[in-house]
Image: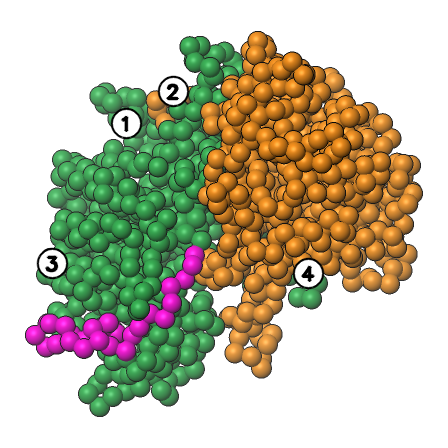
Chain colours: A orange, B green
Amino acid sequence: MPNYTAPTKDVQFLLHDVLNVTASDVPGYDELEADFTSAILEEAGKIASGVLAPLNVVGDTEGCRLENGVVRTPSGFKAAFDQMKEGGWPGIDMPEQYGGQNMPAVIGTAVGEFFSGANQAFTMYQGLTHGAASAILAHGTEAQKDTYLPNMIACDWTGTMNLTEPHCGTDLGLMRTKAEPQADGSYKISGQKIFISAGEHDMSDNIIHLVLAKIEGAPEGIKGVSLFIVPKFMVNDDGSLGARNGAAVGNIEAKMGIHGNSTCVMNYDDATGFLLGEENKGMRAMFTMMNEARLGVGMQGLSQAEAAYQNAVAYAKDRLQGRDVTGTKNPEGPADPLIVHPDIRRSLMDQKSFAEGGRAFLLWGASLIDQAHRSKDADADGLVSLLTPVIKGFLTDQGYDMTVQAQQVYGGHGYIEESGMSQFTRDARIAMIYEGANGVQALDLVGRKLGADGGKHVMAFFELVKNFCKENAGVSETYAKDFIEPLKNASKDLQAAGMYFMQAGVKNPNHALAGSYDFMHLFGHVCIGLMWARMGKAAHAALDNGASDAAFYETKLTTGRYYMARRLPATTMHLARIQSGADTVMALDAESF
Amino acid sequence: MPNYTAPTKDVQFLLHDVLNVTASDVPGYDELEADFTSAILEEAGKIASGVLAPLNVVGDTEGCRLENGVVRTPSGFKAAFDQMKEGGWPGIDMPEQYGGQNMPAVIGTAVGEFFSGANQAFTMYQGLTHGAASAILAHGTEAQKDTYLPNMIACDWTGTMNLTEPHCGTDLGLMRTKAEPQADGSYKISGQKIFISAGEHDMSDNIIHLVLAKIEGAPEGIKGVSLFIVPKFMVNDDGSLGARNGAAVGNIEAKMGIHGNSTCVMNYDDATGFLLGEENKGMRAMFTMMNEARLGVGMQGLSQAEAAYQNAVAYAKDRLQGRDVTGTKNPEGPADPLIVHPDIRRSLMDQKSFAEGGRAFLLWGASLIDQAHRSKDADADGLVSLLTPVIKGFLTDQGYDMTVQAQQVYGGHGYIEESGMSQFTRDARIAMIYEGANGVQALDLVGRKLGADGGKHVMAFFELVKNFCKENAGVSETYAKDFIEPLKNASKDLQAAGMYFMQAGVKNPNHALAGSYDFMHLFGHVCIGLMWARMGKAAHAALDNGASDAAFYETKLTTGRYYMARRLPATTMHLARIQSGADTVMALDAESF
């Protein structure tokens, strides 16, 4: 069975050596002293490895079962959920007013990676609750907040998001679920929603469904969509639970992975719902928490890559097979461990340099969210809006590929479910799809975010890279050669791609859209290149300052050099694909496929 | 449920327009008139789509069950297997002397792709039998051939290959299974083998296991490995079946995919075995059929990509979601079909250009095998030996990626098992692992095949590309620009990589081995680029000759242009990775991972 160890030391490095959180003026960051964050991370790491990780295979094997309208979660899930609640983990970055601990997103995200890496399907129950609570926090009335948030932040009640219907996923304007206004100000909600994660289960007293629906007579398309709170059990005025509402699970889906999470068909049959936010502004209400939710999905992709990598390393050190061509390394044994072989190392270095670079990217993104929310920094908000589809799309695509590489290290044993390596790929696969399939992320990036506010945010990003390169070229000669030069080249590729979109896209938007997916990956590589350059600089500084753990920082430099030399050259390929334009992409009639 | 249609027209194009089989002097090719091959392909296609494809999901859902030592295959498998036997399909490319139809490998491979695309797990039963029969054909005594081949070629008896043991996969020198010589010339075989596909099942009267084992006192390592025939039921002198042998299934594995094939732990307990070939020459006996077997696995990767692609296209045409940004295409409907969106097309074109290019590569490889075997052409033999790890490694890696892309077209529905799209990825995943994991293919390519016969075969390949470019630059101006130029550039990248290996690898073999995986992919892209250049030329010729189906040939040209413009630029990235050498790959101590 696979093991999981939370990468606490790596997060400490990122928080304190790279992001330098205590020096930041973001409200709340001054409390994030190294001892304090270390204590939180260690505690979260213990739960991740000790409580959640052992249930990961259990969740996959048992799955969820629907019995007479009740969904049974896998053995041990309820007890672990109670333990998470007791530790206050679900509310770590939620307001104190409603029972949370008011930590910044950067801490919530760091801890979230541990939980998700240990058990993605399990962690989704609280992740969705977090998302639903955020929506109520942003758009609810005071009464709604008081009624729902304390229970949701404690995870006594969990939450769901209901968007998809059988005939509409990305295109929510086609939605058919109806909301009929009632005399008392509530609505009767009727319709069917599918792919509802954690839609029904046995771990909480109540489930608060957030449901998109159309009020009768509303405008066509997405401009007529409203958001409703639809509790499983009605809530009485005194806060106690009342009658069962007309919201019921119709079926649970058999899926490729995340078997431990119940993915439900939800049937709403004259269910009582309460408007959240304004009429016909449902999409806007959903979108205000989209950055957070998409960052969370990017985190899942990364988390599975990290978990799979850890097990691939353990196997590569343990499994004896073949001999090092440059000389036997394990003369007493019948063969050398797999890790001596260059191609195994190539695979492990791909994984390691992605996991560490991706984690830096993710926590940088979370710190921008903190700047945007806590410091009301509009530039940070614009930048993180730009980066969000990259974090979601790139980290989940690459995260998935890395789980496949990790599985490959196991050879035939990786294909057998007993090893647990297949589960990492099957679970990671969903992150490329939900919260907006990655093609939709690419469209959002190129079609909306690039040009937002007159292109101001992408220009700011280029400026940021340029300034970083200028300011740090003098760190050392090797640093300039190994880090700054490749970052400059990759950034030039990204700028050239942006320029191509501006020039060719004006003539025909398809020239931009046909290159959107490659642009998302190109952008992702530049971001991780920037992260490695920042980490390389921090490692240099630590070594110069005589850091006690020199091996840790030396390893950082080596891993960074690997990424710059072996991963960043992908930008050239993406640029070439982009610059080939839409002609060959769009040339065929639909019938010719 | 997914559908499957055999790409018969595409194979006809490859056989007659591109490979021009009837003009070849390979014995047997003169019979391959277009009408004749069309009849075979149509018949095979009917069975693939009508009989095998409907059982694909059944096999995945039901899987195989072990009950009291008997393995039950999924519902319908036995009847379908009987139908395949009655049609004579398993022996299509086997000698007439033993009941086969003596068709060339190029036909066996084309038909094999259809069967595998329709149902990979099912087709493996006859595929493994084919492999085992080939080994007996190449190394058996006349008596062994007479005893086993007619039954195996008819698939009344099926075959297996027993290599892997719990502690040894790639490194077969560590093998522990023992063979004890008996007075009558037979051996007693004892040991445990794992991952034995089709090791036990209920579809044939007997199972002929080919088992690698060490005779007592044999040399250490792989030089002491011998190959044995171990029948499930002993065969009496009159050909009837006798006593049950000491070969029994211990367990069947729960796997990520190919659930319809029974992957067995096989226990040999004083089982009677008969030496196949010479003592201690078991590896050589295995390797003589390795080209064929690895080509077969490459075919599987391609076949799943084709099957998944077909369903992605159908979904993209059917599913209405969003609007074409350049103007509504389906004004009467609530939305346009997915296929109008540039990124969906990008994905479908990736898939289409791979499937058609990969098929050309595969059938070219099969035609080289025919040249090698039927015309005793040593150059063809050397070339296909060089290309075999590329066919296996590249087609299975890329084939898998394409199934993932096809699944992505379905959005959330692709993650639900009901759509059948997950099965394509889960089934395709194994092809990257078995018959030598793809890292081992890369090692074989760079460590053995490149330098074989003084590098003669890779030089011949470069010569072949060079001559093709020179001879066909004049086909037309656009052809030269769209096909010849990109092929030249990609081929230069491949040569530069080979040059780097020669120069740097001499100093340190790790410089070559650390780039082996990228080299395999670089080589694969050049091969498919060459195939597209050949197909483009053939399409040009057909159009110039006033072919009646102009749309087919125009589509070929467009698809080829896509591959050259959008896929071939990957060679630059692979070259950059290769030329960065082993330093960053090998720098870390094992403890630093």
User: Circle 3 is placed at which residue position?
Assistant: B99
Q: Which of pointers 2 and 4 lies earlier in the amino acid sequence?
A: 4
Is residue A292 left or right of A250 when viewed as pictured? Answer: right
- Position of residue A87 measured from the top left corner of the image (x, y, whole percent): 77, 51
Q: Is residue A575 above or below residue B242?
A: above
Element under disc 3: loop
Please state if B369 lies on the left or on the right of A421 as rendered: left
* Label 3: how many Cα within 10 Å (few below 14, some 14–19, many 20+): some
Q: Is residue B242 magenta?
A: yes
Judge by depth and name the residue closer to the eye, B540 or B389: B389
Closer to viewer: mark 3 or mark 1: 3
Do discs 3 and 2 share a chain? no
Residue A589 shows which numbered tag? Answer: 2
Q: Note whether A105 is above or below A579 in the view shown.
A: below
What separation in Å lies between label 3 and label 1 (alpha carbons)?
40 Å
Q: Distance between the residues labelled 2 and 4?
A: 55 Å
Question: Same chain for the residues at labels 2 and 4, yes or no?
Answer: yes
Report helix, strand or loop for mark 4. Answer: helix
Locate the C terminus of chain A and report the quarter of the image it occupies.
Answer: top left
Span colored in magenta:
B228-255
